[in-house]
Amino acid sequence: MTPAPTNPPPALTVPLPPDAGVLARFFDGNVWHSFKQSPMAIVAAVIALVCVVSALGANWLAPHNPMDLATLELSDARLPPAWMDEGKSKYLLGTDDQGRDILSALMYGSRISLFVGLASVAVSVVVGVGLGLLAGFAGGRIDGFIMRVCDVMLSFPSILIALLIDGVGRAMFPNAHESLAFFVLILAISLTGWVQYARTVRGSTLVERQKEYVQAARVIGVSPFRIMRRHVLPNVLGPVLVLATIQIAAAIITEATLSFLGVGVPPTSPSLGTLIRVGQDFLFSGEWWITIFPGVVLVMISLSVNLLGDWLRDALNPRLN
Amino acid sequence: MAIKPLLEVRHLRVEFPTRRGTLLALDDVSFDIAPGEILGVVGESGAGKSLTGAAIIGLLEPPGRVAGGEILLDGQRIDNLPAEAMRKIRGRRIGAIFQDPLTSLNPLYTVGRQIIETIQVHLKVSAAEARQRAIALLQETGIPAAEQRIDQYPHQFSGGMRQRVVIALALAAQPELIVADEPTTALDVSIQAQIIALLKKLTKEHGAAVMLVTHDMGVIAEACDRVAVMYAGRIVEIGPVAEVIHHPAHPYTAGLMGSIPSMDIERERLMQIDGAMPRLNAIPSGCAFNPRCPQAFERCRSERPDLMPAGATRAACWLHAEPLQVPA
Amino acid sequence: MLAFVLRRLFQALIVMLTVAFIAFMLFQFVGDPVTNLLGQDATPEQRVQLRADLGLDEPFVVQFSHFIANAVQGEFGISLRQGRKVSSLIAERFPATLELAAVAALIGLALGIPLGVFAALRRGSFLSQAVMTGSLLGVSLPNFLIGILLILVFAVLLKWLPSFGRGDVVALGPFTTGLLTTDGLRHLLLPAITLSLFPMALVLRLVRSEMLEVLRTDYIKFARARGLPDRMVYFGHALKNTLVPVITIAGLQLGGIIAFAIVTETVFQWPGMGLLFIQAVQFADIPVMAAYLCLIALIFVTINLVVDLLYFAVDPRLRIERTATGH
């Protein structure tokens, strides 16, 4: 009998040394790998980055300051974008009816939109995670009550809740200071989003609570906070992160919708939604750029954040690989 | 064998392309099943038993694919058939039973509807006759009040009952071969024996051969005529059940038998095989079992053994090699 | 099952009471309840009279029960902005919103389900990826932007369809409908499509993901192992199992449609309840806000209840008592 040929094992990547740091492990892991392989995720991340940078740096990057009334020239009003016939290169994307540069207005507006969006999600996460931990750990009636509230709030669309809180705020403080108006707006949007975090965290807390090492820790006398912080939170970070990314897009859209409806940010600090509303009036006279460009930026921001969230969810889901 | 085999598997290779390279899950697997015979396929989890069954019925989960070898049913190749031709074979000539009866049945349809549709897809019978056959099948598998229960939903049956329904479904189109993948693993121990006995009886009556995949030697001993032992994607021993159990020729098989508690033989300690079955990306060269084998020698580490005669069975082990011919 | 229905009804009642409570608080503490009920132009004598009638000195619970009694009859006072009875305002506007919402829901389901099935079955193909990208746009694009885009394309550039208002309507008893006139239909088209895109995209993605999950189950594998043809596996087995969980979400989307009608009606100046509500919020018109709130809560609670009952009808596991017989 002739000897069978030996089969060498297939060539593999070199494994990491055991003491590789967090960053090294991240770049070797599935998440980064699937990111590199997904052109959409890369494009989305780049667009999001561009938007965020230009929004944050609006003060320095914007060619004009649309807020400063002194710099406006009414003779330059209603100019189309620079590449069209009557456009001027000074105003790359055209001007509105007051002579404000659309490009600069976009950058300042994005800043406001991003600010409200991020702040709302931050508040949502804090409230949601906190209530979720409370519900999971306290159990009993507190848990039941919080879950009832969650159920009820979930059955109402976010826009209604936001409108309600905003409307009540308006009615209670008719001559509100600008920062109060922002506060009410952020509160309104954040109260629409906390429920998802609460539920997820509560679920994880309940699971961890059953585990023996938690029960042992409680017997020894370790405080519940410590248990929550060390064991529940790390497990929950992944889903919360995915949720938060998607919610940022939703929060930005909600703010834009409220501002479009006229009940969002104060008119002195126009966000992208306000710009769109103002622009709609000029559609029929052919000045489409006043409303379309803010719309495009809004879509780009929300799409790229959504794509990132989608990709993140797939990357963190071991089953789909 | 004088009788022409029903199923022939020749040098079957199944691989899984992954991000980190291609894994070879089945490596040169060959065996036959005669008509009406019950062949057991036993091995640890991950040895490749279920994959073999999946490859035979043509339902390998992507990205798994057949990378070499042939599968012949009644002398004709079935591994390279177009999808529609393979579909006609499934159910009609080769039936399948899976492990978990709870999830094998569609919860939204009655048991009867699922049996009747199988019958009608493969056999040209009227709806009324299909229903009669379905009732008869249920009665055969020992389900009481079959005429009423045929219109009930899966969740209204207990675990053992459901597996009987699954067996009825597998037999519905009267196949020649049944691939049974761990049919009793998800059931209570007390019911396992009943189901195995049922399977044996019905396949004898219907004249069907069975490829019975399991990790439970007790089931093998109870039901099978022959048994194949798999390790790391290869068959390491194959032969009549009594021989393999009482006179195992391969050290791995011997280890398996020694690790089973027995009521008649007194043993102070259960035998334990050191180490664990290698992962697919780290299979040793030569004989896959050599790092754990108490009788391994030089040749085992460098050359991979094929199945060779070893007493009443065939084993892939150099211990049973013919003495090397000295060149003249 | 009766116990289940009773329990859900009880929960619904609690929700309604909570909403009524919030509405009541709005009346009492935001703005002046007397003004809320009488309007801005009431005389001092009317005010004093109403205070006595309302029993504003009476205990809280009594006032609340008066409020409930009124609310149940649809009596919410007078709109601060328009000076008319809130109930008649709402009755006027309700058919417009209902029509818009119903047509949008129909479009959403009729397109969303088949497209979702297609995207699941032809996964990875160019068309299905295009559909998925389209659906991503559908959930990312805000309602009002879609409306503006449609107006730009179809009303401004192509001049095919009108961009605001309801057109000619036909009165059928207390109900007015634009479905029976071509003009009405033309006016309905753009707003209905705008309103349907988000739920359509949602249903599409949901159907696709559910179907992909179902296609990986053991019973589908077993169905294939029995040699059932693809058509039967996909449309006989997989589809039914897919649609069951989709029902709930689709039903809940109906509530979302009615809520998002607020935005669509604003974009298209569609004379419905949503537009009324927005104007009320801008104006701090409490009675209208409160009435809208209660009505919406009622609609939502009803939808939820119907969806729950629907689940019962469709999933046999919930319906039939489990019988554990022998083995």
Image (tube, rainbow, N blue to C red):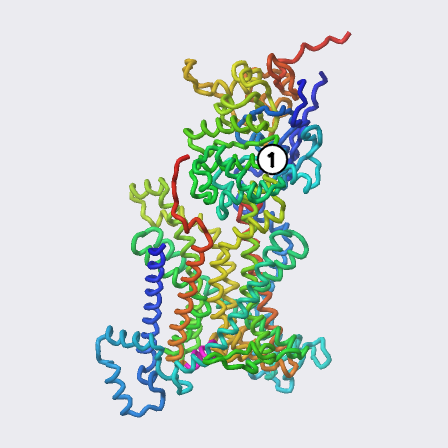
Seen in the picture, residue C176 relative to B155 is either above or below; the reply is below
Whole-percent x and y of residue C95? Answer: 48, 77
Q: Which quadrant holds the C terminus of chain C?
A: top left
The answer to whether residue A73 is left or right of residue A241 is right
- Magenta range is C273-283
Asked if one can make out residue B302 in the rendered structure from this viewpoint, the answer is: no
Check disc 1 and give the amino acid type: Ala
Is residue A194 visible in the rendered image? The answer is yes
Q: Which residue sits at x=35%, y=62%?
A: C9
Q: Which residue is mark 1?
A: B54
Residue A261 location, x and y as percent?
A: 50, 76
Q: Residue furthest left?
A: C58
Secondary element at tag 1: helix
Residue C174 x %, y %:
45, 80
- Chain letter behind tag 1: B
Q: Is residue C229 above or below residue C3?
A: above
Say whether residue A303 is left or right of residue A266. right
Instruction: Pick whichever, B11 or C148, lies toward us.
Output: B11
